[in-house]
Amino acid sequence: MSDWTEKYRPTTLSEVRGNNKARDQLEEWARTWDDHRESVIVHGSPGVGKTSAAHALANDLGWPVMELNASDSRGADVIEKIAGEAAKSGTLTGGEAGRRLVILDEADNFHGNADYGGSAEVTRVVKDANQPIVLVANEFYDMSQSLRNACETVEFRDVSARSIVPVLRDICRREDIEFEDAALKKIAESTSGDLRSAVNDLQAVAETADRLTVEDVVTSERDTTEGIFDFLDALIKEEDAEGALRASYDVDENPDEMLNWIEDNVPKDYEGEELADAYEFLSNADRWLGRVRATQDYSYWRYATDNMTAGVAASRRGNKGGWTRYGPPSYWSKLGRTKGTRNTRDAIAERIAEREGTSVATARREILPFLSAMTHHCKNRELTVRMAAVYELDEAEVSFVTGSGKDTNKVQSIVEDAEDLLAEETVEHSGGAFFDAGDSSTDRDGDGTAETDASDDSSDQETLAAATDSGSDTTPSESETAADDTDDGQAGLSDFM
Ligand SMILES: Nc1ncnc2c1ncn2[C@@H]1O[C@H](COP(=O)(O)OP(=O)(O)OP(=O)(O)O)[C@@H](O)[C@H]1O
């Protein structure tokens, strides 16, 4: 089954939903480009249609597209070539001939790529461009001020549930899927303005049901407790440090999950320095959680909780009013944040698919989220090492799956151990797939290696199914209750390996 977000990507601007004003502004910018010759920054949250709009625009105007992104190693000279070239071929003197649309994705990320010679270089190229350039970004303020000043700006807002529902309905009709309107509404409301997630969720639910009902959607949702939303309101908007800590006592989530919720939702209301401060506390909390995992000393949980509640509340500046659409930390928002990470995700999915003998789509939609939950923040080191070995993941990829920083010692040492493991060929002998049956055991003696036994290749498919099935009810919130965090992690593992 193909990826619906690709299959139903808008091909013309009129199909870009929920951001009419931004869409019209973008079109106007393009049609008048000869008069102003400015580049445009299109910014907004992931999955709201920025990149699609740029492509649809080019399609409507019949302009060929040249697309580059910040993780591209080709560098600024490539943009220069494309955008500068036309001057020589006569475009400067007028005429539409040779006109193309340059799309620079992840424009808020160029400073991280030395190949582009830093953002000053990008700004220079953008200013002198002889072709229209669309810079796509999630974080407007992550771009340098000179770059921002040099461009026009178009803001894409989160897509309202009201605009998401018709998109989902249209897909259902074209896929010949029966549905309850309420089910579509439920999906639309739970994806917090992100249309890509909504389409992904729709496809995920549609694969398990013939007729989409509200119940299908509800049961497929991760068990989100109502309480967490009240807590987020209290933490982010209402309570002082002490009140926020007290409010957390009513939340039925373990600290790891709670941290994810807070991390994903705080940026919806905090900005600038208060956000930076809040992140500082969250990263302290993360360190304490790491210490709990390393030492099994649960008394450290208190410090983690203090940081993520009292610390975050104390970082707040001024009053926060209004209503905010808080959402669960979904796999998809974690795994598909930018095009760069999507490419990483797909590269990993391909290797998993090859190893496990499944389709890439299954690997991406089912296995990868499962692995991600099981190895979140490298919480089970042995499993993470083994996964890195079997799929030959590099630092960036381990970081992607686990959510731990790529430059951390933790991730680097995991990749090193994985390489050692591969060198010993223990993994090769295990039959090649990660989801082997048999009595492989994980490392319990703490020497960093996972001892695996050879097992029967022919069982791969079966155990994979079993593993992914179990995966759906092994969300961190269910399997990691306070008392059995590590034990459960270890015992649960051997069930899957
Ligand atoms: N406004 C929209 N109208 C119709 N479909 C949309 C819209 N926004 C997103 N989609 C769907 O989501 C997919 C992803 O959208 P797109 O890549 O354009 O988002 P984006 O805002 O550029 O996100 P990112 O910044 O993560 O790249 C599209 O292929 C399409 O299926």
Image (cartoon, rainbow, N blue to C red):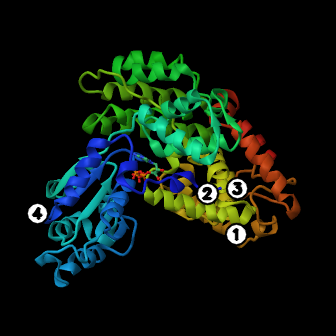
Label 4 – label 3 distance at C-alpha: 67 Å
The disc placed on residue 422 is 1
Give residue 432's position: percent from left, percent from top: 77, 66
The answer to which image quadrant residue 130 occupies is bottom left
Of callouts 2 and 3, the N-terminal one: 2
The answer to which image quadrant residue 125 occupies is bottom left
The disc placed on residue 35 is 4
Of callouts 1 and 3, the N-terminal one: 1
Q: Which residue is mark 2?
A: 2
Rendered-image quadrant of the N terminus:
bottom right
Label 4 – label 2 distance at C-alpha: 42 Å
Label 2 – label 3 distance at C-alpha: 43 Å
Q: Is residue 317 left or right of residue 387?
A: left
Decide if ligand 1 comes within 8 Å of the CB at mark 3.
no
Location of residue 110 with respect to 49 vertically, above or below: below
The residue at the point 31 percent across, 36 percent down is 275
Label 1 – label 3 distance at C-alpha: 16 Å
Of callouts 4 and 3, the N-terminal one: 4
Q: Amino acid at mark 2?
A: Ser
**Viewer-side residue, 53 vs 414:** 53
Q: Nearer the viewer, mark 4 or mark 1?
A: 4
**Viewer-side residue, 231 vs 494:** 231
The residue at the point 61 percent across, 40 percent down is 293
Of callouts 2 and 1, the N-terminal one: 2
Q: Which residue is mark 3?
A: 447
